[in-house]
Image (cartoon, grey):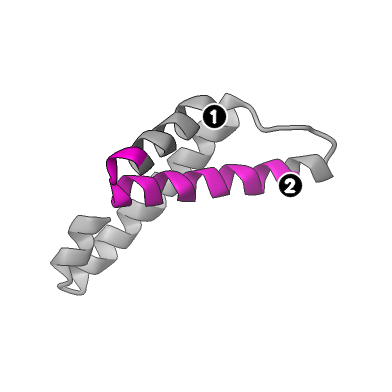
Amino acid sequence: MRTRLVDGMKEAMKSGEKRKLSTLRLINAAIKDRDIHARGTGNERVTDDDILAILSKMIKQREESARVYEEGNRLELAAQE
């Protein structure tokens, strides 16, 4: 899964897709943060299941942000989320 994310980042850089690149960088940073935390507990790296959990959490955060923006009548920001 990590290689798919890195490959996606490379493709986004080459094609100039700034929003996609930004999103993939945010995901990669969250995974690296979890890697650092896992090293402190004796594990070397997070698994694909851990990555899926990270992605699920990030999706929920984005959905909540979009809902808050809609309630605040900020539809353009809700659409971005």
Give the amino acid type for the residue marked by disc 2 in the picture.
His
Extreme-bottom residue of the structure:
72
Other residues around mark 1 within 10 Å, as few (<14) / some (14–19) / many (≥20): few
Mark 1 element type: helix
Residue lying at 15% horizontally and 65% vertically, measured from the top left: 76
Measured in 3D between alpha carbons, the distance from the residue under mark 2 to the one under mark 1, in whole angstroms, is 17 Å
Q: Is residue 39 left or right of residue 78?
A: right
Identify whether 72 is placed above or below 6.
below
Q: Nearer the viewer, residue 34 or 61?
A: 34
Q: Position of residue 38 (x, y in %)?
A: 75, 40
Question: Which corner quadrant of the image does residue 20 belong to?
Answer: top left
Q: Is residue 67 left or right of residue 47?
A: left
Q: Position of residue 70 (x, y in %)?
A: 19, 65
Other residues around mark 2 within 10 Å, as few (<14) / some (14–19) / many (≥20): some
Q: Nearer the viewer, residue 12 or 68?
A: 12
Asked if residue 15 is among those painted magenta in the image, a careful observer would answer: yes
Q: Position of residue 50 (x, y in %)?
A: 59, 33
Identify whether 35 is placed above or below 19.
above
What range is drawn magenta here?
Answer: 14-37
Residue lying at 66% horizontally and 32% vertically, measured from the top left: 46
Q: Mark 1 — residue?
A: 2
